[in-house]
Image (tube, rainbow, N blue to C red):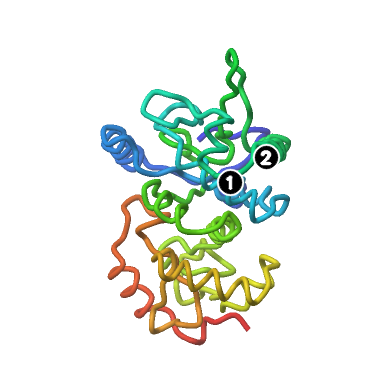
Amino acid sequence: MKLEHNTTIGEALENGYELISPQRKERNRQFYEREGKKGVGFVMMKRDNFNAVKANLTLSQHGVLMYLVTCMKINQDGKLFKSKTKRLSMTDVCKLLGKKPAMVRRVIGELEALSILYREKEGKNVYLTISDEHFVCGVGSEGYKTVKIFKEELKRVAKEVSLTELGFFALMLGHMHWNTHVLCDNPDEMDNKKIILWKKKHLIEEFGVSRPFLSTTMKKLRELRVIAEVRTVNEGVVLHPNIVCRQTSRPSWETICDTIDNSINKDNLKK
């Protein structure tokens, strides 16, 4: 790890950096090599970078962004594609979203102003690229806390929900605990018994949505298996590992349930 300005290792660790052993580095290399051969089925959100800008986005803007990350391909520097070889243009985005060009141009312009994505003109076409400061498909996430979003599952969900509902899902990602998948105050807590678990009402307070919107959206996300309930913490919210994950290997739903049942109870609920 390269330290700057006489920063000590202790200070670096306090600022969120991680020490990576040669063995883990090799495992990471092998993992990316394996996933590269499969085309990488997931996009990695750089959580803290995204959390820093998400307050500036509306739910619809979040939803558009979630649609677009499904068009990222491995090690293409954030370029978006509509097929294996053809890049995604502004015209394609209008068709993808089923929205009028004026609305799409406005939203894309707002995302570009925040340096989340940018446009690139080639001939008569304008193509889109997502900034690697926020989302990565392939290598480039080492040293960051990331959330893996599985593209095919996200595509499936995106076809069934509105842009605001998809945007609400995006907001939840920054608060998912690293191994229990519950939404909480302290998503990096290593001791599961110290998790401060959110109740559903805390999503209203945190994200500024109405109670009717929350009720309708949670019901739809539950039916689509984006979120799920675990008997032990049925007042909380658990994101399904089929769609998101923060670990090197994706855990099964059974593993998530066992982990929660063995470490979390009503005492963890945020007051």
Q: Position of residue 223 (x, y in %)?
A: 41, 70
Circle 2: element type:
helix
Which disc number belongs to residue 64?
1
The residue located at (39%, 53%) in the rendering is 156
Specify whether residue 114 is in view: no
Q: Give the foreground label among 1 and 2.
A: 1
- Which of the 4 quarters of the picture holds residue 226? bottom left
The residue located at (60%, 16%) in the rendering is 124
Establish if 221 lies above or below 13. Answer: below
Looking at the picture, tell me which residue is in the foreground, 170 or 218. 218
Establish if 257 lies above or below 34. Answer: below
Establish if 105 lies above or below 122. Answer: below
Q: Position of residue 259 (x, y in %)?
A: 35, 73
Which disc number belongs to residue 204?
none
Image quadrant containing the C terminus: bottom right
Establish if 77 lies above or below 205. Answer: above
User: Along the polypeptide, which appears first: circle 1 or circle 2?
Assistant: 1
The residue located at (43%, 79%) in the rendering is 264
Looking at the picture, tell me which residue is in the foreground, 19 or 57. 57
| Left or right of 138, for residue 23 | left
Check contact, mark 1 vs mark 2: CB within 8 A: yes
Q: Position of residue 150 (x, y in %)?
A: 39, 49
Specify whether residue 55 is in view: yes
Q: Residues within 10 Å of mark 2 (few under 14, many from 20)?
A: many
Q: Which residue is mark 2?
A: 111
Q: Amino acid at mark 1?
A: Val
| Left or right of 226, for residue 9 | right
Q: Amino acid at mark 2?
A: Leu
Mark count: 2
